[in-house]
Amino acid sequence: MNFPGLWRNASPAADERENTGRLTARERLERLFDPGSFVEIGSQVLSRNRELIESRRAAAGDGAITGFGAVNGQTVYAYAQDVSVAGGSLGEMQAAKIVKLIRLALDAGAPVVAFIESGGARIQEGIDALGGYGNIFYWNTRASGKILQISAVMGACAGGAAYSPALNDFIFMVKGKGKMFVTGPDVIRSVTGEQITAEELGGAETHGTVSGVAHFTEDTEISCVRRIRELLDYFFCRRKTSERPDVPASGDGRLRTCVPDNIRRPYDMYEIIRCLTDGGTFLDYMKGYAPNMITCLARVNGMTVGIVANQPMTLAGCIDINGADKAARFVRTCDAYRIPVVSLVDVPGFLPGVGQEHGGIIRHGAKMLYAYAESTVPKVTIIIRKAYGGAYLAMGCRELGADYVFAWPQAEIAVMGAEGAADIIFRHMEPEEKEEKKRAYVEEFSNPYAAAKRGIVDEVIDPGDTRRILIRTLEALAPSTKEAERKRHGNIPL
Ligand code: HXC
């Protein structure tokens, strides 16, 4: 039977794109959803702009495919901009489609995934296009903290096309293809005289390592879509059957040897994370940005957790401005979507320096304090080695709301390192007496027992037993009783 009105908004340049190894908007959606599950809505929506209609550049669907389907059996709403229709630019009707989709997703309590590739506000539609972005930003913000919003930047994105992702919880970018900027290289050149390519200005590498705009960067479009499905799985399925049973009764020997005896020697915190998580796997959030602060999603005996950890290999694990912003946003993301937070602490302090102070480390560090103190998800903190001063407080300490705090035997919890502290308080003494006092001081305070005596640390544990204790603790906390205290909040970009 022939259905005359039923036709797809076939993109004129689709064949051309396939030859370049790029996916079309429809192919992106097909790869996101479980086979055969996608239901399109709004395929006949058309721009009302006379100029576009008369020049035959208006196309059914108005440059975006919108609809819903299933990802691992769970409902997800999604849209993909079609760059072959006026460069994927956003006009009044495309905006209305996207707003409708976000509102439907809100009603359904389902995530929204956006494949973005757009020249921004459609120039021909002027103020209607601008208003369209205004409406999208409004609904992005209204939905924030209620439903997950994920953007994947698959091509060049200018102006509003960069800002809507920025209001989402997660931004993915495809290397060599995704670009985001508010004003492009040509405008920058004419205004400031600076010469820069689009890739250098707003490519995945730039946003993944320098600006911190992108949370995940992927090599290909296909791996990007796969990673989005993986991310969704962490949120959809918070309690999986573990791929790895508990830990051997004898404990995990690797955990007993991975931290060097010499407190000044760095080690790779990822080794510890791999020992604690199921299959040693995790999803690294903002991996290339502020690597002194690790933030990742992982599973511990099947339970989804967010891990925040200092990385002693970079800046000795100090908290700097970028690391503080990264951790604060991550903790707030976990809290908004009810993911428990596990903090692994080895932090000598906030990064000292004029640049840090003038850049506002006080303001940025405060975001971490706020994020931890505000959160009501289960929180478990494990002090691996150093936990000094304000940085100790900022890493999910007991006083800021950790439910359980464990420490490894080599941990030190203090205002500052014991040697440095002794140098200050005994500075007026004669050298010999000073050395003796210092030795005694270091012996007394270079351990976690002073904190354990006051109950600030709940238990000093055998490092090899950490995974078992973490599993039991998270299980005990799973039916969180803090729902009544919960402060609902959106997920403002920090
Ligand atoms: C209408 C647009 C368009 C736009 C691109 N096109 N952007 N049409 N409105 N905003 C059209 C082009 O005319 C062209 O049509 C086709 O899309 C492909 O564009 P190219 O430039 O050939 O593609 P490319 O070289 O890949 O460059 C992509 C681009 C560039 C970097 C995005 O097109 C660009 O700079 N566009 C303008 C960006 C911009 O200033 N947008 C307004 C932002 S203001 P034909 O018919 O020739 O194939 C904004 C307001 C909201 O968004 C801000 C909120 C904060």
Image (cartoon, helix red, strand yellow):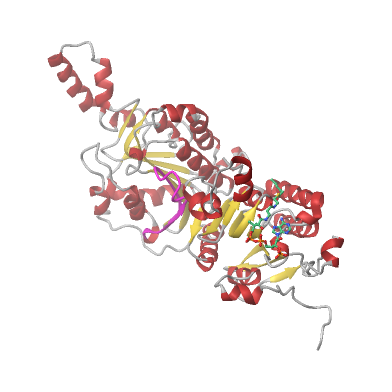
Residue 377 visible (yes or no): no
Q: Up-down: is 20 above or below 419?
A: below
493 relative position to 477: left or right: right
Seen as rendered, the residue at the extreme bottom is 1
Tell me which residue sits at (44%, 50%) in the image.
Answer: 288
Q: Up-down: is 399 above or below 57?
A: above
Q: Quadrant of the N terminus?
A: bottom right
Is 54 included in the stretch rendered in magenta?
no
Q: Using the rendered view, name the quadrant where residue 51 is placed.
A: bottom right
- Location of residue 109 in the rendering, given as x and y in whole percent from the top left corner: 67, 56
- Location of residue 392 in the rendering, given as x and y in whole percent from the top left corner: 39, 32
Q: Quadrant of the C terminus?
A: top right
Name the one closer to the observer, 302 or 369.
369
- Location of residue 140 in the rendering, given as x and y in whole percent from the top left corner: 69, 49
Ligand 1 occupies quarter: bottom right
Tell me which residue sits at (47%, 35%) in the image.
Answer: 321
Magenta residues (range): 280-299
Name the one closer to the observer, 58 or 284.
58
Residue 150 visible (yes or no): yes
Q: Using the rendered view, name the quadrant where residue 431 is placed.
A: top left
